[in-house]
Image: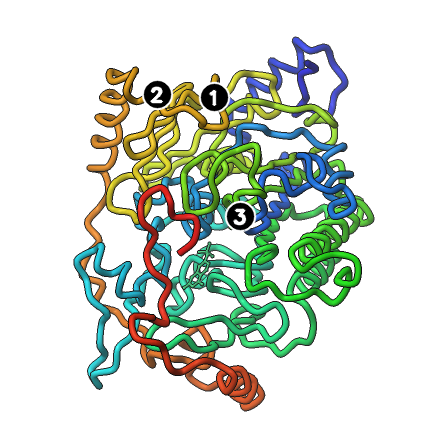
């Protein structure tokens, strides 16, 4: 395999390698070299299964743009995430496993009785006696990749889904390092009316569409709108200042909203995927058209497994499980001159690793108060070296999913043991024949799990319990168009529940937690 270069000079493999090592050793702290630092565009799809893109066996007609990008990219085949949305986003942003900052719990879970019960908590009540959710988010004291890259001189932008806190100012993207924000704060909006289902105290619509943390009224399908925003942002960039664009689409997450096109030919999930593909094509096109292709590291990946197992085959499991189908996701990487087109890289990598990898590329500062789990992957990704990662902690006790660790070839998930190298499809639980490995991995998980900090009292509440719009400041004075839009959706929503039924999704149970 050719060794890729950090340096602009054509050179032999040996020289390139020494430049690479020197670059990494000095962490590129010389800001005078800023023109050599790549722009970083990180596109994340939501709930897309392993086999959905054509390059992984899906229908090529649905993903022609993503497949073209794949042909120009290096494909990572052992790239892992957490098994659900918010934990993956937290790990990406902080370089830390989700359990370290309780990002293995989603903000909305603090308004659901069955989730709260697992923490020994009940639904909170405000001082007027109304039930409401407790505030939970990525803590403001965490250092995010956006903060690190901003400090290194990058323009930082978020277009899409946040899911790391939707209420207090300190938890919103522009307090967490993003200089530009566009999109939604919470788990998943209606693609047309931009409202989200709120769970406590009622399963009612809340508006969730913002630019620079102000409500915006826009017609259109969110997948298309996100692409339009990213094209606009790219058009405003220059070669003077490097940029970091984080583009977490809500597609292909539910609700299953028929897109404005492709529905005549494809069923809704397929049409939604094809719309996502259109959007990815437009973003890649904008990068290339504005002359940023050669100086941009473009990553396309996904946050966790799909809702249906048929979308993760040949891997087992779905989102919300730590089977391979829940945590092994497609990942493409394009940086001309540094990545090789059309090759695969089998090295093991975890979503958090981008944190340290990007800081090195940006010549940023690796020093920080909170310890990171991220491993700098530059030598593996661009230097032809084996992966330095041999362990991934997917879950420890205290989350709603099974404690799970990957260690070398083995994976312990609850009381099941798999050899992922021999049995990547997890057909054979070998716990009974390898008790010594089970004991070793269980002990390691127990030790790491002790590093989970206390949750604290969670005294802050969302008040009012049912806002018009997420964002406390934005809800203080919502415009009348927004109130009308929300009322219109609420008037169509269910208010009565059958005995035994609740407006809240139930916490998953064990390994069979495909859906909530
Ligand atoms: C139906 C529903 C209710 C809710 O409160 O949160 C969710 C979160 C979901 O996935 S995530 O975005 O991956 O966390 C998916 C569905 C829901």
**Tag 2–tag 1 contact (CB < 8 Å):** yes
Q: Is residue 260 above or below residue 72?
A: below
Q: Position of residue 224 (x, y in %)?
A: 70, 62
As drawn, is 31 to the left or to the right of 375? right
Q: Which residue is mark 3?
A: 308
Q: Which residue is mark 2?
A: 430
| Kind of element beneath mark 3 | loop
Instruction: Specify the farthest residue to the front.
Output: 499
The answer as to whether callout 3 falls within 8 Å of ligand 1 is no
Name the image quarter holding the C terminus.
bottom left
Q: Which of the two residues, 432 or 129, is positioned nearer the viewer here?
A: 432
Q: Position of residue 136 (x, y in %)?
A: 32, 61
Q: CA distance from mark 1 to mark 3?
A: 21 Å
Looking at marks 2 and 3 on the same chain, the residue that comes earlier in the sequence is marked by: 3
Q: Quadrant of residue 211?
A: bottom right
Q: Which of the two residues, 2 or 303, is positioned nearer the viewer here?
A: 303
**Does residue 330 show up?**
yes
Q: Is residue 134 above or below residue 283?
A: below
Residue name at image x 52 percent, y 43 percent: 309
Q: Which mark is residue 423?
A: 1
Query: How many other residues sit within 10 Å of disc 1, few (<14), some (14-19) or many (≥20)?
Result: few
Q: Which of the two residues, 221 or 43, is positioned nearer the viewer here?
A: 221
| Kind of element beneath mark 2 | loop
Query: How many other residues sit within 10 Å of disc 3, few (<14), some (14-19) or many (≥20)?
Result: some
Q: CA distance from mark 2 to mark 1?
A: 10 Å
């Amino acid at each position: 395999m050719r060794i890729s270069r950090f340096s602009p000079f054509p050179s032999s493999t040996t020289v390139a390698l020494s430049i690479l090592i020197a670059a990494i050793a000095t962490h590129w702290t010389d800001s005078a070299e800023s023109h050599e630092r790549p722009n970083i565009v990180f596109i994340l799809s939501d709930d897309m299964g392993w086999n959905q893109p054509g390059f992984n066996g899906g229908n090529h007609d649905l993903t022609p743009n993503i497949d073209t990008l794949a042909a120009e990219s290096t494909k990572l085949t052992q790239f892992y995430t957490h098994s659900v949305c918010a934990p993956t986003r937290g790990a990406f942003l902080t370089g830390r496993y989700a359990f370290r900052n309780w990002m293995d719990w989603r903000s909305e879970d603090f308004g659901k009785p069955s989730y709260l019960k697992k923490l020994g908590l009940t639904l909170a009540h405000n001082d007027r006696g109304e039930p409401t959710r407790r505030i939970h988010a990525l803590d403001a004291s965490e250092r995010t990749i956006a903060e690190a890259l901003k400090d290194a001189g990058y323009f930082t932008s978020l277009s899409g889904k946040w899911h790391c806190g939707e209420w207090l100012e300190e938890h919103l993207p522009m307090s967490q390092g993003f200089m530009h924000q566009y999109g939604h704060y919470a788990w998943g909006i209606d693609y047309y009316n931009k409202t989200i289902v709120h769970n406590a105290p009622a399963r009612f619509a809340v508006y969730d569409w913002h630019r620079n943390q102000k409500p915006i009224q826009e017609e259109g399908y969110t997948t298309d709108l996100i692409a339009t925003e990213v094209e606009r942002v790219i058009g405003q960039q220059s070669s003077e200042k490097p940029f970091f664009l984080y583009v977490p689409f809500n597609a292909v997450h539910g609700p299953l909203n028929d897109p404005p096109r492709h529905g005549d030919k494809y069923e809704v999930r397929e049409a939604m995927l094809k719309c996502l593909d259109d959007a990815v094509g437009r973003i890649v096109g904008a990068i290339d058209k504005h002359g940023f292709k050669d100086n941009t590291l473009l990553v396309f990946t996904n946050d966790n497994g799909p809702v249906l197992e048929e979308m993760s085959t040949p891997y087992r499991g779905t989102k919300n499980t730590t089977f391979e189908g829940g945590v092994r996701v497609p990942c493409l990487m394009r940086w001309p001159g540094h990545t090789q087109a059309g090759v695969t890289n089998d090295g093991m990598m975890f979503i958090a690793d981008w944190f340290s990898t990007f800081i090195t590329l940006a010549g940023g500062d690796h020093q920080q108060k909170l310890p990171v789990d991220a491993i700098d992957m530059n030598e593996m990704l661009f230097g032809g070296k084996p992966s330095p990662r041999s362990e991934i902690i997917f879950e420890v006790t205290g989350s709603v999913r099974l404690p799970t660790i990957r260690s070398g070839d083995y994976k312990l998930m609850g009381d099941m043991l798999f050899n992922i190298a021999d049995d990547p499809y997890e057909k054979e639980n070998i716990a009974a024949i390898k008790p010594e490995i089970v004991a070793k991995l269980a002990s390691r998980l127990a030790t790491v799990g002790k590093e989970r900090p206390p949750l604290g009292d969670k005294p802050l509440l969302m008040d009012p319990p049912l806002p018009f719009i997420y964002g406390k400041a934005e809800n203080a004075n919502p415009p009348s168009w927004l109130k009308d839009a929300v009322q219109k959706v609420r008037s169509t929503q269910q208010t009565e529940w059958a005995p035994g039924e609740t407006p809240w999704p139930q916490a998953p149970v064990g390994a069979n937690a495909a859906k909530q």
